[in-house]
Amino acid sequence: MRSTSRSTRLTRLVAPVVFVSVLVAACGDATEITVDAEPAPSVVTTVTEPLAPATPPVVPIVVADYLVDGLPFPVPPGAVTLELTNNGEDFHHLQIWQVDDADAAAVALEAGDLGALQGGVAVGGVGAIEGFGTVGRVSTTLDPGEYVLFCVIHTPAGAHNELGMVARLDVAGEPIAVDLPDTAHRLQITPYGFQLPEEWDGRQPLSVVNALEWAADAEFLRLADGATRDDFLAFMDGSRPGPPPFTVAGGVAGLGSNRAAVVLDPLEPGDYLVVSFSPDPAADMAPQFTTGLLTELTIR
Ligand SMILES: [Cu+2]
């Protein structure tokens, strides 16, 4: 089976990369990580050197149709950069929630029970991306504990969590003293809608702050030529047949109340929608894009 062999291959491929990237980032240089690097003793010794300033360590997560590759060892607490690689043909995002019992939550998610997340904390994953090999990067802060990584996108193939796109992540060990990347640009999620940054040209890192009392997301959808916000709404309610009138372009997946995350990837010039797909507890759990979290954004 294609998915099984790919899973095995990715696990082998990714494991040493993760190890090296976390260690290397801890000593202040998270720029280039190569696949054939091995966690050699010389790398380990450099961790103790007090090099600064540090950037958040990179935590690479690979997804495909329809799996999420988990990490075989804990990630240190603190600021991290989640680096999502979509090695599938469908589009996928990376939701990351802190929960009391990651194994129980994973079983429930695979059974289609999102109630398992209640009482957990959405910490800001990577918004949906598409195109084989596409990468999306979001910096966020992880406290020690258990997490589930998953995709809840529905496409004609089904609900991706029910197709197996669930994995666990443990955060433990010595904290790494780094902050989220500095940004001059901020997108706020407020009770009155998205408050867009005033002078952002799409090329610099963007801080996303959720000022709501519940989780929300801020995903970027690039509209197809001539498509409008109404075409998006018609597609979502099923009244517009055919392919999506947009492509997905990253952003921040579920982000809990009063939390911040930083989108690192630039947006190409074009017409976008900023959308929250999260359920609205103040409106019978209707998707938030139907209750105010839907805004147009043009990048020139
Ligand atoms: Cu998916």
Image (spheres, grey):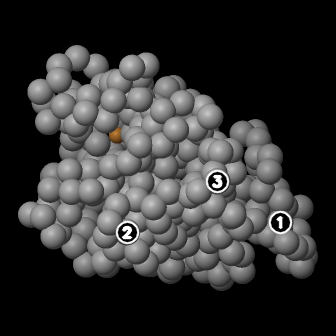
On screen, residue 95 versus residue 21, left or right, reads left
Q: Earlier in the sequence, mark 2 or mark 3?
A: 2
| Closer mark to the observer between disc 1 and disc 2 | 2
Element assignment for label 2: strand
Residue indicated by mark 3: 199
Residue indicated by mark 2: 190
Is disc 3 in contact with disc 1, using a CB cutoff of under 8 Å?
no
Q: Quadrant of residue 89?
A: top left
Can residue 8 be seen at all in this image of the molecule? no
From the image, which quarter does the C terminus lie in?
A: top right
On screen, residue 274 versus residue 134, left or right, reads left
Residue indicated by mark 1: 28
Q: Amino acid at mark 2?
A: Thr
Can residue 133 be seen at all in this image of the molecule? yes
- Dot 1 alpha-carbon crowd within 10 angstroms: few under 14, some 14 to 19, many 20 or more: some
Q: Residue furthest front?
A: 198
Residue pictured at 68% horizontal, 64% vertical = 183
